Image (spheres, rainbow, N blue to C red):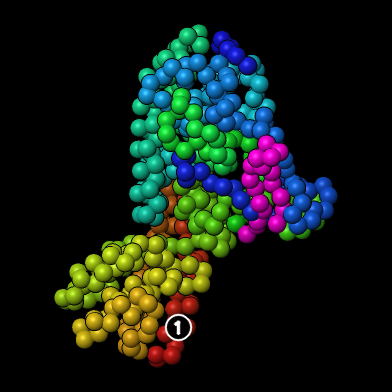
Amino acid sequence: MKKGGGRTSRIRRRKLFRCSVSRGGTGRGLMSKTSLREGQMIISLPESCLITTDTVIRSYLGTYIAKWQPPPSPLLALCTFLVSEKHAGDQSLWKPYLEILPQAYTCPVCLEPEVVNLFPKPLKAKAEEQRARVQEFFSSSRDFFSSLQPLFSEAVESIFSYRALLWAWCTVNTRAVYVKHRQRQCFSTEPNTYALAPYLDLLNHSPEVQVKGAFNEETRCYEIRTASNCRKHEEVFICYGPHDNQRLLLEYGFVSIHNPHACVYVSEDILVKYLPTTDKQMNKKISILKDHDFIENLTFGWDGPSWRLLTALKLLCLEAEEFTCWKKVLLGEVISDTNEKTSLVIAQKICQYFIEETNAMLRKISHMKDEEVTLLNQLTLVETLWTEELKILQASAEILNSLQTPFR
């Protein structure tokens, strides 16, 4: 390879973490060699150690990016750089970093279709959207890749394959931190906020920990500080944010055990599954829920059905003579004991439906693990997601049972 010179707004701010006792060693992680005080610096990475669009522009790709029309996106520039540097092998200055990156990812876009079909419906829909988005990203970038042919002795089609670009896309999507850069005319108007930070990749995720991480404009370093004390020889964790397990799997390719933010989503069709079909006001009730943003993000969690879910059910369970009180329901007011009781009963039925569906899916996955040995790792990942959801539903069922006690 010839050498020349020298996500949009959704990018996670990998913020807020502290320490937790490691179990049996840290494995591939970072352990504190000394005690750390709250607010103490853990890591300070100079700007020169970050891979950003500035890194790409200063490289042999800069000339080609500057003259390409329409201007490529910051994401495309970074992905192109990663694929190119990985192809360079020993010649790449970034070889030590590239070698610690995963060779394959477990984001849904990388999983086999028969595995994605096992996802909960809301996650499956988002996974299919993600796959279509990445495929379009590849298709729309092929002409730009062709323009880079003078840099390589091999055909660019073999270097910038879909598989190679998918690996680079997942690298940026799962590992980039937020660093705002000045907008350059050679890039599209998409937010230029990506930065790959070598060494930070060794930090493992925990949903319960907190740190402060941000780019310091004065020191020109990406700095991470503790938000609590940390004892010597404890592992240091990072938290990607208060995400549920479906979001973690979609964006990062893993499921967090005992995730306090984990939940089970209730779609519109399931919401009305156990309501009387004879309710002449049902369409109007659904319309009201949609108009007031109460038809989505209805969930069961570790602490039972969410307030939004119960509120939506209370409105749907209003008797004809109570219908004029729908505004009071959305404000959290109690309309009648009958309405309270009915909504809890429906919530219990929905919860039980999910428990039965989840158990059936776990049986199916168990059978597939015996039959599809090559998919064992992918199936185990999905099995973990469903197992966590089952625990949440069982907890919710117990809570719902106790909530109904006063009405018995």
**Viewer can see residue 20:** no
Q: Position of residue 143 (x, y in %)?
A: 37, 19
Assess whether residue 99 is covered by the magenta stretch.
no
Q: Which residues are magenta?
A: 208-227
Please state the horizontal and vertical placement of residue 226, each as a whole percent of the image. 72, 53
Residue 115 is left or right of residue 231, and the answer is: left
Question: Would you identify the image quadrant in which residue 132 lies?
Answer: top left
Relative depth, front residue between 405 and 149: 149
Q: Quadrant of the N terminus?
A: top right
Q: Where is 107 relative to 83, above or below?
A: below
Magenta stretch encompasses residue 220: yes
x and y percent of residue 312 in the render? Answer: 33, 72
| Relative to 327, 372 lies left or right | right
The three-letter amino acid code for the residue at tag 1 is Leu
**Residue identifier under label 1:** 403
Above or below, comparing residue 107 to residue 344 in the picture: above
Residue at 46 percent of width and 57 percent of height: 386
**Rendered residue at 43%/17% (across/down):** 67
Q: Is residue 258 visible?
A: yes
Report the predominant secondary structure element of the magenta stretch. Answer: strand
Q: Residue at x 35, y 89 (%)?
A: 337
Residue that appears at 45% across and 12% down: 149
